[in-house]
């Protein structure tokens, strides 16, 4: 399980109910994480170079954002 895993993101919202939003990041070539983050509610707010061949994509999502609710056949 990684931080891009929707189960982790759902758990974070329950564990920290006072939190208004989460900051997320992934490599710009991490297609599965980007697809997860592109679901309704998450917004890409910037990209920055980490190394010459590595670019980070930074996102924010409201704490009540539940990535699981956007997948068919899940709880």
Image (cartoon, rainbow, N blue to C red):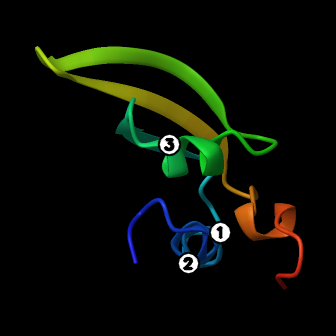
Which residue is at a point 38% across and 41% down the rendered structure image?
A: 26
Left or right of 64 on screen, residue 1: left
Residue linked to disc 1: 17
Determine which residue is flagged by label 3.
31
Give the x, y percent position of residue 7: 59, 77
* Cα distance in 3D space between marks 2 and 1: 6 Å
Which residue position holds label 2? 15
Residue at x 16% of width, y 20% of height = 53
Q: Residue at x 64, y 72 (%)?
A: 10
Q: Is residue 12 above or below residue 26?
A: below
Does residue 12 appear left or right of residue 27 in this picture? right
Callout in the foreground (2, 3): 3
Asked where in the image residue 69 lies, by quadrant, the reply is bottom right
Nearer-the-camera pick, 23 or 50: 50
Q: Secondary structure at mark 3?
A: helix
Residue 40 place in picture, x, y as percent: 82, 42
- Marks 2/1 in contact by CB < 8 Å: the verdict is yes
69 w.r.t. 26: above or below: below
Q: Nearer the viewer, residue 43 or 26?
A: 26
């Amino acid at each position: 399980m990684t931080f891009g895993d929707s189960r982790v993101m759902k758990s974070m919202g329950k564990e920290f109910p006072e939190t208004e939003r989460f900051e997320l990041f992934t490599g710009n070539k991490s297609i599965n994480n980007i697809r997860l983050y592109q679901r309704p509610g998450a917004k890409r707010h910037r990209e920055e170079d980490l190394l010459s061949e590595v670019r980070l994509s930074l996102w924010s999502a409201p704490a009540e954002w539940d990535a699981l609710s956007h997948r068919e056949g899940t709880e």
